[in-house]
Amino acid sequence: MATLFRRLTSTPFLRAQLQTLTRVGQTFFFIHLFWEHFYCVGAATGASMLPTINIAGDWIVISKLYSRGRGVGVGDMVSYVRPVDGPGVHVSKRIIGMPGDWVVVDPEKGDEVIKVSVGRVPPGHCWTTGDNLPFSNDSRHYGPVPLALVRGKVIARFKPMPKFFENGLKDVEN
Amino acid sequence: MPPKLHPTLLHLTKTLPLTLPALIFLTNHVYSLHQIHGRSMSPTTLLSNDIILAQRHHATENLRRGQVVLYRSPIDPEKVAVKRVVGLEGDAVVTRPVGGGGGGGGGGGGEVVKVDSGKVWVEGDEGFWSVDSNVYGAVGFFLSFLFFSFPCSCSCLFSVWWGKEGGRERKRLIGGWMDG
């Protein structure tokens, strides 16, 4: 017992423990850095992005290189922190308008049709909607989203059936 | 043969890449240092080139009127703005005329605006040079990761260390704001 205690409190043993702990910490922070600033994977749920993303069971890859809206454009799918209903709710939607663009606010609300309104996206914001318009809670409800809230661009589906998402809008050549 | 590095330098080249992720975590989520540019908070709170310590963890909890906060500007996501909270969600705020100095165009003001839920009304201390809620309206509070308050003692500490003058006086002014 005494020898065991002596061994466990010996300097080389403690130094080895400390080194292991340091390595664990370094690994944790390295993975955290990669996850926060490069790429991350998350489960996406909800009907708002049908048919691009399924209601449940889809895992998507988010590129954090596009965080704060750097380099995103109309037609890109982005993940952002929802600006209403509490912090920490992440949603994926498609960008319809970038700063300065004119957007038509979808006139359909429930069954009744209200008057069509056109608005200009303010600087530093973007207008987003889901692909599945009737079942999406998006800019039509909470207004333009600050680009600072954009966490990244949704670049691919990880599972099931891995697939890269491409921007459906292409330049037309005459 | 490659040139031989000094042992300390060699040690640093090994350990720095390994500690860098931890440092980035620290400055992104716990505390960060910022240098003030511009004059929207002068001369009462912060002068240009002051260096402040910002608290990033639990930053949006217990926001109070009079507190100085940092947030990502709604009109330019790459910029961090420092302003004072004037109204919390549900408050009615009388807008201030927009000064010409900040590029807001000038004029306006005097309207009563209700701050929506989930938003706060922020204003600079120096109306003329400040681009704040009077220009772009209330700022979303659920931009939560954008918001960070700093303890005023720390800011003053850094003002005393780094600022040009008047750290002690600024503390008194902030204290008056906090109490009043």
Image: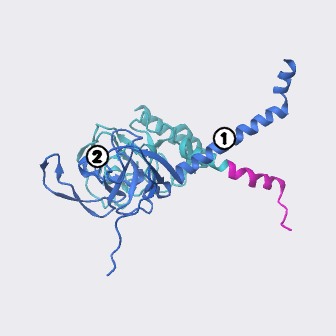
Local packing at callout 2 (Cα closer than 10 Å; few below 14, some 14-19, many 20+) is some
Q: Chain B's shade in the image?
A: cyan
Q: Position of residue A141 (x, y in %)?
A: 25, 47
The picture quadrant where one finds residue B68 is top left
Q: Quadrant of the N terminus of chain B?
A: bottom right
Q: Is residue B7 magenta?
A: yes
Give me the C-alpha separation between circle 2 and circle 1: 40 Å
Q: Residue at x 56, y 41 (%)?
A: B30
The chain coloured blue in the image:
A
Q: Position of residue B150 (x, y in %)?
A: 51, 40
Q: Which residue is mark 2?
A: A137
Q: Is residue B129 left or right of residue A127?
A: right
Q: Is residue A85 above or below residue A169?
A: above
- Residue B68's disc is none
Q: Which residues are magenta?
A: B1-18
Q: Residue at x 40, y 63 (%)?
A: A166
Q: Position of residue B15 (x, y in %)?
A: 73, 50
The picture quadrant where one finds residue A13 is top right
Q: Is residue B169 magenta?
A: no
Q: Residue at x 47, y 39 (%)?
A: B59
On whether disc 2 and disc 1 are found on a single subunit, the reply is: yes
